[in-house]
Each structure stands twice: as structure tokens, then as C-alpha cells.
Amino acid sequence: MLLVTNFSANAEISIRNQSPSDVDSLYTEVDFAELEQLFYASETPNLKVIFNDTLKGFAIEFDGVQSNLKVDSIIVIDSLQRGDHAVTLSGLDSNGEQIELSSSFKVKAYPPVIDNDATVFGILMIVLYFVFRTANSDRPWLKKFYKYVPALLLCYFIPAGLNSVGLISSEESNLYFIASRYLLPASLVLLCLSIDIPAIKRLGSKAIIMFFAATVGIVVGGPLALWTVSLIAPEVLDGEIWRGLSTVAGSWIGGGANQTAMKEIYGASDTLFSAMIVVDVFIANIFMSILLFGTGMNKKINKFFKADDSAIESLKNKMEDFQASVKKIATFNDYVYMMGITFFFVGLAHYLADFLGPVIKAGLKNMKTVYDPTLGTTFEQQQGFNDTASDLMVSFGSGFFWLVVFATLFGVLLSFTKFRRFEGTGASKLGSLFLYVLVATIGMKMDIMELIANWGVFKFLILIGLIWITVHAIFLFIVAKIIRAPFFYVAVGSQANVGGAASAPIVASAFSPSLAPVGVLLAVLGYAVGTFGAILCTIMMQWLSQG
């Protein structure tokens, strides 16, 4: 008996009670419990999935599409296509109780040409060299090219292209794990270590108000945009789209480090994350170009806001004094001291996260269980406040979440000590270098062909992004008009959130090169609050999606 159902564009699935013996050699047999792994279509075009034959009459759901067919012990999946796939079985077990089994797996077209991590790391580093060498070239055509194509975008998409054509693969590499667990917390310590709280205070209350107005615009704009688009496309509330949007919130409030943190905390799939990176970079750079265009009309906009920008000149002088006070030629000992302090606190953040994460996770699990004194046992609570609260607080049980929190906290605390002067020997530069290595490893996880295959959903993600950034802009202009803030604070406050340390100095220097550090200082403040603001935004989007 053979029944074939086309579940999606990504694969064909055949459901049968038994596979014919004469074609068994064409299928790779795998136990359902071991299905969560990577398969290559060139080596394993067909799968025969075996599960417990005492479980009878299971309904099957493949890639979110439910079938009315029943299976007993074998699922045969034909013509595997690249992408992430999920299989869910639901039915009655041998005792007549309802049970549901879920598993997911990933398919790539073929194994990578290069699978040696040392070689892959060398390729990623030469990509960074190529991008920044050409971005700083004096050649007119390159200057014109990078005027429209940001260097950050190439740091994502060149590794993505190498992955998409099969030259390298993140699935065969540990580089992303190393970068996210070691270089990411180190970059957070180094970037937050450069926070100068007194210098930020000297920026004036209007600069800080505009920064947090931009943050509120992102936090509120996410769920509002998701709800608005759901009115014409209800499917955006289904599935895991809110998980992917959480990474955009992390990027637009903090930066790449916070974006990666949100991906790890909420578990967005690589395919979804790839789509979100495109939304993030595409929308953010459109908005940055609008702000840069606005710098040419700075005086007119300030007149509209009725803002006095005389304080900007004083600020320029103060920032020049700050730069001069910390700048020095770094010695070998300076780098040893800096790296010693940084990675000690990275290690301490890991230690505390490894302890606190499991404790909170166990506590959240207890919130979902109820003790029945009549039976003397506990059972899983399926409804009620405790269940909902536990689901919304799931990020607080993530060890990676606490790793990011503690690394950020240690960096901020160090900014109150003499170690803040490491900024003069390149703390933020090294932190940015670590971050760009992380960016390259993230790019290596993108598969452009998967994005093309999922364009139907992707177009709505772009619409969400456009509405989201519009809400952000409206918040900025309303608050600026009320407090009469100069357009400089509007532009830099926005980019300190949306663009982060890579873009905020660019917009600040468009007003005056000496003001670039102002963008850096506010962007680093974004790193400090980015994850917390993004979690608040994500909780609202999760609540909207899950009702």
C-alpha cells in the first residue's frame, strides 16, 4: 500500500505501513528519536523513519501541514529538499492515552567542499580583510559602491554566498559556537567597558531622552506592526515568526551581539534568522539613508523643532578633550592586562550562567506542575496563569541569556573603575573586531536559496519591518517636537538603537567628525539595554501570536 501526499514545496512525503523490500536499498533508515540531525540530499535523497510499532494510528503533520492519513510504524520521505523540516505524530499509545511526538531535521544539497575549521576561519578572516580594505579604499568607484552598500551587509552576505554554493557550511563547523560563547561575551565586556557615564550625562538630558524615545519606538513598534500586518495576512501570527522578529528587536535596540543573543534565547531557526537578517539590514539602511539625507537640512529641521543647537558646539569640544585624555599607544602589557580582565569576566559570566540557568529553568517547570494531595502525585498543568507566566518567562531559564546579562553587567561595572581607561588602548576596537568575526560566522549560517523558497512569507516580513521603523520614526519626531531636541539627537539617538556601533558614528560624523564618539557612546548604551528591551518587545509579540 502506498499513499503519496505533497505536503509542501520543500519535500514529498510518502506514507506507508511497510516499504517494499526491493527498494529498501534506496532509503536511509533512521529511528524517529534520532531524526534530529543534518542530511545531505545528494547522499540521502529518501528517508525511511521508524518509530515504535506499538503506537497505532498516528496522524502526521509535516512542515506545519496536517494530513488526514494515519501511520503505524514507518514514514517514508521522498525527494528531500534543502531547508528545515519538522515532523509531528499525534495519536493514542498502547494504553489509549493521547500522545504527541515531534522531531525536526535539516537538509542541505550536498556536503561542503571545505570542512576544516582552521581553513574556514581563514576564509572568513580574508573576507573581513577584503571588505574593510575595499571600504577604506581611495578609489572613487569603491567609495560610490560603499555609499550605497554598507560594509556590514557584505560581512553577512559574502559568507552566506559561500555557504549557499556549498563551499563552506556552518553545519560542519564549530566556529559559530566558539564565536557566540567566547567572542560575543568578550565583545560585550569590551564595548560596555568603554561606557563613560559622566560623559553620557554631559550629552544633556535631551540626548538621553531621544535615545530612549527611539528604544520605546522599537519596543512598541514590533507588536504593533505584527498586529497590523496580521489584519491582511493572519498567517504571520502562526508558527514561529515572533521568534525571528525577536532578533530584529535585539538588533534595532542594541546591535549584532544582542541580535545573536535573542536568536539563542528564543531559538529562531537558521532559515527564519536568515530572512530576519535581510529585513534588518534592508530596512535599517533605508532609514539610515533618510537620516543622512536629513543632515543636509539640519537647520531647517531644527527650526521646525524650535530647537537650539548651540550646545552641540560645546559638546564637540568636550568630546575632543575626552578623546585626548584616554588616547595612548598600546603596549604588549596593555593588551595582556586588557585580555586578562576581559576573559576572566567572560569565564565568571559562564560560571554564573551555568549555575543560575538550570535553577531558574527548574523553577519555571515547577510553575507548570500541580500537586494533587488526594493522589500524592504531581501532574503537568495545561492551562491557567502559572502555565502562561512560565511560557512568557522561558528566556530567563536560558543559560545563554544569563551569559549575555552577566557579561553586559560586568562591562558596565568595570566602566566605573580604572579599567575604563582600556578604551584608550583599543577596548572598543577589539570588541568590534570580535563582533565582526561573530557576524561572519552568522552569515555562514545563511542559505540564500532557502530564502528564495520561502518568499511567500518573506514579503510580509518586509512589510512588518517598514511599519515597525515608521512607528519608531513617529515616536522620535513627536518627542523631539515636544522637548525641542536638535535633529542631531534625533538622528544619533535613532542610529544608536537601529544601527548600533557600526552606524551611529557614521550619522554623528555627518554633522561633524569630532562628534563620532557621541554615536559610539550612545550605541554602547544600546548594547547595555538592548537585550532587555528586546525581551520586553518579544514578550508582547509572543503574547500576540499565542493569544
Image: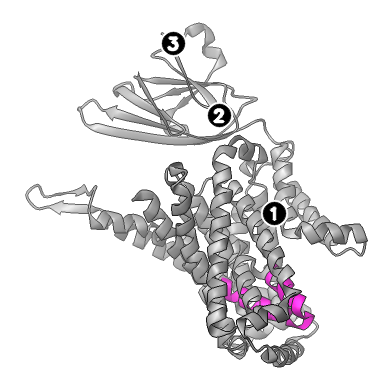
Q: Which mark is residue 2?
A: 3
Q: Residue at the location (35% across, 62% down)?
A: 360
Residue most extreme to the top: 22
The earlier-in-sequence mark between 2 and 3 is: 3
Res 140 → quadrant: bottom right
Residue most extreme to the right: 139
The earlier-in-sequence mark between 3 and 1 is: 3
| Crowdedness near tag 3: few (<14), some (14–19) or many (≥20) residues, C-alpha within 10 Å | few
- Circle 1: element type: helix
Q: Are marks 2 and 3 in contact (CB under 8 Å)?
A: no
* Disc 1 target residue: 440
In the image, residue 95 lies at what x, y percent?
20, 28
- Circle 2: element type: loop
Disc 2 to disc 3, how far (Cα)? Answer: 20 Å
* Disc 2 target residue: 10
| Crowdedness near tag 1: few (<14), some (14–19) or many (≥20) residues, C-alpha within 10 Å | many
In the image, residue 93 lies at what x, y percent?
25, 27
Name the mark nearer the viewer: 1 or 2.
2
Q: Are marks 1 and 2 in contact (CB under 8 Å)?
A: no
In the image, residue 15 lies at what x, y percent?
43, 18
Most foreground residue, 390 or 48: 390
Q: Residue at the location (90% across, 57% down)?
A: 141
Most foreground residue, 389 or 363: 389
Looking at the image, can residue 129 be seen?
no
Give, as a three-letter code, the residue at label 1.
Answer: Ala
Is 506 one of the magenta-colored residues?
A: yes
| Crowdedness near tag 2: few (<14), some (14–19) or many (≥20) residues, C-alpha within 10 Å | some
Q: Are marks 3 and 1 in contact (CB under 8 Å)?
A: no
Compared with residue 275, is residue 209 higher up or lower down, i.e. above or below? below
Give, as a three-letter code, the residue at label 2.
Answer: Asn
Most foreground residue, 490 or 303: 303
Q: Is residue 221 left or right of residue 56?
A: right
